[in-house]
Image (tube, rainbow, N blue to C red):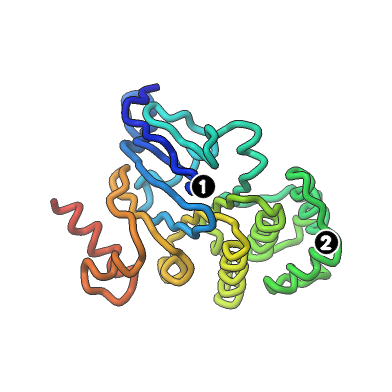
Amino acid sequence: MSTAKVQQQKPEDALSIKNVGVSYGAFKAIQDVDLNIKASECFGLIGLNGAGKTTLIKAILDLRTPSDGEILIFNQRAGTKAVKQRLAFLPERFEPPWFLTGLEFLKFSARMYKTSISNAQCIEYAERIALDPAALDRRVHTYSKGMRQKLGVLATILTDCDLLILDEPMSGLDPVARALVKTLIVEARQKGCTVFLSSHILADMDEICDRVAVMHDRSIRFTGKPDKLKALSGDLSLEQAFLHFIEQKSAA
């Protein structure tokens, strides 16, 4: 692994990605990715399908080994046992074990991180995300897509990890549930949790993210506050600003 460009991580960084590239044979899936996410920050990653977002997330989770650069999480290399105990991940296609009840899954997830949660806590958070508490006693195979997604969000947040990586957490949720999930994410951040969020719902990103990064053509092309991206094109919505931005980059 080449580390010629790797820089020293600042103490306040929860996640430091320095000049990272990931290759599949001769194909470079991502290249020269450079990001610093501060502790207690809600950071959004946006980009078209195929831009490299999933590969980057896999590299952060140590599911793909970078061919270049380095990833540090709380000043430690990604993939170490100490790092894994501080990081919880919600995948885009979340499928919990269907033979467990919702309550069993929440408690199992918490135990994986040496965290204890009571039945009362599970019921409280289920109500807060508009998941019928009675459903917690049912097996997951009876859940709808939206119910499974709510369960995944709850399981991730209730781990009480320092870093949450959420890949399309609003997938399959109605507007009411989306609003409730955003509230939980903001509260987690206010308690000191760092949130790394990927979503195609840019209005949600604009609302809750302190900063965003635009990934286009396998590289990071912009990092900054949502308002800064909107100011570049004079757009009122983050979605329109993003579309104008990548249109300009594609034409360049």
**Number of marks drawn:** 2
Q: Looking at the rendering, in which quadrant would you find the N terminus?
A: top left
Q: Is residue 3 above or below residue 102?
A: above
Residue at 32%, 30% in the rendered image: 5
Q: Which mark is residue 225?
A: none
Where residue 98 appears, as percent x and y from the top left, is: 75, 50
Question: Looking at numbered disc 2 in the image, what kind of residue is underneath it?
Answer: Arg
Q: Is residue 62 visible?
A: no
Residue at 72%, 62% in the rendered image: 143
Residue at 85%, 67% in the rendered image: 120
Where residue 164 appears, as percent x and y from the top left, is: 58, 52
Q: Is residue 42 visible?
A: yes
Where residue 74 appears, as percent x and y from the top left, is: 54, 42
Q: Is residue 193 left or right of residue 230?
A: right
Q: Which residue is mark 2?
A: 138
Q: Is residue 21 left or right of residue 165?
A: left
Question: Looking at numbered disc 1 in the image, what kind of residue is underneath it?
Answer: Ala
Q: Are marks 1 and 2 in contact (CB under 8 Å)?
A: no
Q: Nearer the viewer, mark 1 or mark 2?
A: 1
Please name whichever residue, 65 or 95, is drawn nearer the observer in this view of the structure.
65
Q: Is residue 131 left or right of residue 247?
A: right
Where residue 172 appears, as percent x and y from the top left, is: 57, 65
Q: Which residue is mark 1?
A: 14
Q: Secondary structure at mark 2?
A: loop
